[in-house]
Every structure is written in C-alpha cells, then in structure tokens.
Amino acid sequence: MLIVFDAQVRRGLSSLLALAGVRGLPWIALSALIMIAQTVLSTIPVVAIVPLLQLFSDPSASGFAVQWVAGIIGTSNPEVLIPVFALSIGVVYLVSSGLSVLLTWWQSGRISTLGVRAATELLRRYASEPYASHRTRSNAEVIRNMGLVVTSVSALANVLTIYTSALTLAGICIVLLIASPLVTILTVVLFGASMMITQRVLRPAQRRAGEEGAEADLQGWFHMLPLIEGFREARLTNTAERFVGAYEQTRLRSMRAGRIMSTLGAVPAAVSQVVFAFAVAGIAAVLFSAGSTAGAITTLGLFAAAAMRAIPTMNLLAATVGNVRSAEPGLKILADASEDLDVEDAFQTTPSGGRPYRGDIVLDRVTFEYPDASEPVVRDVDLVIAQHETTAIVGSSGAGKSTLIDIVLGLLEPSSGTISVGGESIFEDRAGWYRTLAVVPQEVFLLNDTLESNITFGYPATADSREGVLRALRLAQLDSLVQSLPNGLQTVIGERGTRLSGGQRQRLGLARALYREPEVLLLDEATSALDNATEAEITRALKSLHGKVTIIVVAHRLSTVRNADKLVFLQSGSIAAEGTFDEVERAVPEFAHLVELGKL
C-alpha cells in the first residue's frame, strides 16, 4: 500500500504500526476496504447526474435509468421526470456524503487509537530502557520524539487520504471514460503530467523544510527546559531573557519552515486551476467539433459535474503528498528511536516469582567502566553490606560513590564481578530486587499533587493505605507539617514541592521511602539539605530502624555517618579502608583531614 512512497516513509510508518502493536497487513487491508467504500460513495453522485443531463439536452432520451424511473412513477413526461431526477440526485448526494462522513469518523477513530497506543508504547520503552542508556539521553530529545508520534500519525492519515483521493479520481475517470474516452484520456494526461511535474519540482524544497522544522523543534525544547527545570538559576543569573531570545529564534525557524510548507502546498492547487481553465476550453472544442450539440452539452455537463468532485480531490491529494514529504524527517527520527529502543535490554517490571532477596549484600571484585571512558570508575571492590546494619560510604568527589551505589541498586551492571544477596545475583530478578529497596536521593522528585499522593507515589492513595502514610510521616518527623497545612494530607504541594522548604522536601522523600517498608534503605546525600536539629531527628528515626532494615548511607556530612556500624572510604574507585568511624580515621589520612575540617 505504501509502495508509491520512498523507503524512508515506509520505514517510518511501519515503525509507527509496530509501536502500536498493529499487524500491518490486516490493518491496511481494512483501510483499503474503507477507501474503496469512500470511492464508491464519491463516484455515485457523478454517475447519477448523467440521466438528468440527458433529459435536459434531449427530453426524448430513453436510457435505462429514465425508463426505469418512468415505469415507477407512471409517466415519461420530462416536466415530471426532471424534478424527480433532480430530487433523487439530491438524496443520493445527501446519503453518499453522510456515509462518507461516517466512514471518515470511523477511520479517524482507528488512526487516533493507533496514535495513542504508539505514543504509550514509545513512552513505555523509554521508561524500560537500561539506566546506562537513559543517562545519555537529553530530555529535549525524548520530548521531541514523543511529539513526533503525533506527526507520524498525521502522516499516516495523510497517506490514507492520498490513496482515498487517488481511488476517487480513478472511479471518476472510469465513469468519464465510458462517456467520452478520447476527452477523458486527454484530460488525464494533461492533469497527470502537470501534477507530476509540479510534485517533482516541489519535492526537494518540501523535504528541506521538513528537516528544518524538526531541527528547530528540538532546539526549541533545548532552550525551553532551562526556564522550566532551572527557573531559579536562570532568575538568579539573569539569563532567562537569553533563553527566551534563543527560544524565539528557534520558533521563528520553525515558523519559516511551516510557512514554506504552506506556500508549497498551495502551489499544486493554483496549477490545477490554471490547467482546468485550459482543459475546459479544450474539452469544449473537441466535443463540439466531433459530435452533436446535445451530446456535447451532456458530456460537457458530466465533465463539469465530475470536476466539482475531482478538482478539490486533486488539490487535497497534492497538499497531503506535500505534508507526507514534510513529515519524512520526523518519520526517520521516530523509526531510528524505535529501533534503538527495540534492541535495548528492556527492564522487566514483574518479579520472576523466586524467593525474596534476604541477607547480606555481597560485592565480589566489582569493576565498572563506562563505554566511553578510558579507565574504570570502580575497581575490584570487595565489600559485604551486612543485613540489618548501617553501612556508610564516604569519599571525596570523583571517588566513585555514585557509580558504586548505582551498581548496588542494580541500575548499572558491573563490567566484571558479581553482586549477590543471600547467594542470589541481583541481576537475575531486578524487579524482585527493586521491590525490597527504597531510596532517598539528594534531589527528591515531587509531584504537583497532594501530600498523600507524593508519599504513595504512583500508587493510588486509599483508605487502606492511610495508616501506612501516617506511620511514614511520623518516622520522617513530618507530623507538624501535616497539621499546619490547610487541607492536611490532601494539600497540593505545588510543582516540585514549591510550598515546602528544602528540609521538608527531603523528609517527604524519606517518608515516601519508609512507606514502602523496605528491606534495604539507601540515603544518597539525603541529609544535605537538613539543618542540624532536623538531621538529629532523622538520625534518631533511622536508629529506630536499626536491626530491622539494612541501611546504606552516602554522605559528605560526617555527622550523618559517625554512628554507622561500618564506614567504607572510597578513593579513586577502590576501597581505601573500611571499619568503624574511628578505625577509618586512623587508617586514612585523607579521611582524618576531612574529620579535622568538620570540627572547624
């Protein structure tokens, strides 16, 4: 069905159908049937007008349709037959147009549903891709690619419109061939040649405009996101206007590309109108020189009626071909993204059903090196994180703490070595491992939703979950916050928690983690935004979990890790020392220096 278009368009639309989980051949076959039905409905009114034209040009005409209707109404009087035929044609137009609208409505619903499924699947693939791949992507690229699904769905709709229009024109040509073969052939050659030449001339410009528009859209997101995600920094550095100005330039580029596309899309319609004017003169000359006046008038009237359908259809055909060409760069990007995500090792969200992870976390000669790095970030780490004890990981910036934690969490898979819990590799059932974990990051992501929904995070807040929410709030020292809010748990905290202080946001992240009742709790610089008093309260809350939960703390603030059961000091990706706080202080001069600085 897509054979007329080049390989890039076919590839892009095939990727769209695959993302939607639609089997291409059956879906296209049904679309073809719909198009054929629309073609028949568009051709019937043209056929129906022939008897009326015959009666007007020759009242004594006795064609099959005229005799059939005369037999039904009981008279062959033209004064009666002509109004009857005129009324009948009006009814035919009404019925065919109504059915055509219904078919368009149904087809539009099918295409829209396909678009929703494709967008959902693409988002699911982004959400399920390996963490290492996710880290390399820009937000602007992901957002742009999600938007391209809409463009691709429009391209698919345009392709179907093109074939529906082509079939409609073919049906009209068949009717005209029966009436006047020579004139029809001349008309088809004239219009066909003009359209082919016009499209060939316009094709390169349409493709360039599409590429320019796709690139401008991507750059627009690049300049918009700093104003949304980095609003505070943009305000304080007085650079917001620079981002706004850059955004304006990208939108102007996109506007110019759209303007070019609109102008190019109008060219075929203008050409067809000029060709039509010359065609009418040529058809009239041929008809009146080759036959009777009555026959010429009938045929000319039929061609005029056909032109009422054919000209708008040809204009629509030319415009939609241009739209598909302009969408070609986006189709290529979508196909590349789909294939890239398709070959990735997608994360399985459902646990395998094996026994739950319980026991010590054991790292055996773990090494990790990023694909584009020249040397490992983590080197030959042997470490036991004892069950239900608190293990602190410290080190200077660049020591490899974050990478090691991502490995322990199962987000990154080591280049060599193993990580096991209770003798089972965490990579055998990552979803099962994640079920036992809860993480409080340095920057807690908060929803523009209620306090309660931010704690349940992704799960519906119900009456049954309320007790767990209140328990988590108590442990995170947020009781007073709930009481001070106007609507308590149902208070909307604003985008990224703008109604809360930094310490409250961090404690809300802790409450979210504790709500999960985890076996392993990781605090990744989670106390960095807390004042000393609040930090002391959080430390007391964590002490209440000692012996019940395995706690891993990554921190620069030494007060947070002083009472850990084990402290691990990382240096250049390797463990320089491990033991109690005092033992590591004595063993590592660098750590001892940090302790001294902390006393100032």
Image (cartoon, helix red, strand yellow):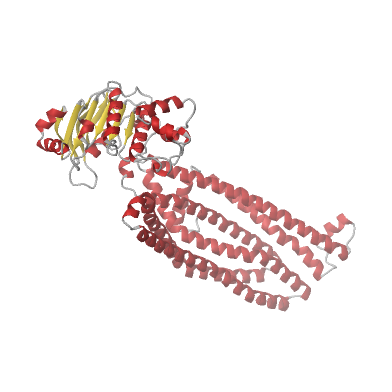
Residue 491 in view: yes
Residue 471 x %, y %: 39, 25
Q: In this rendering, would 570 be left or right of 412?
A: left
The residue under the point 38% across, 34% down is: 348
Q: In this rendering, would 42 be left or right of 417?
A: right
Quadrant assignment, res 379: top left
Residue 592 x %, y %: 12, 35
The residue under the point 38% across, 25% down is: 353
The residue under the point 60% across, 59% down is: 165
Q: In this rendering, would 248 be left or right of 56?
A: left
Residue 494 x %, y %: 43, 42
Nearer-the-camera pick, 41 or 335: 335
Task: Specify the farthest residue to the top.
Answer: 547
Nearer-the-camera pick, 208 or 495: 495
Give the number of callouts: 0
Nearer-the-camera pick, 389 or 204: 389
Q: Name the quarter where the C terminus is drawn.
A: top left
Quadrant assignment, res 292: bottom right
Residue 64 in view: no
Quadrant assignment, res 398: top left
Residue 558 x %, y %: 20, 34
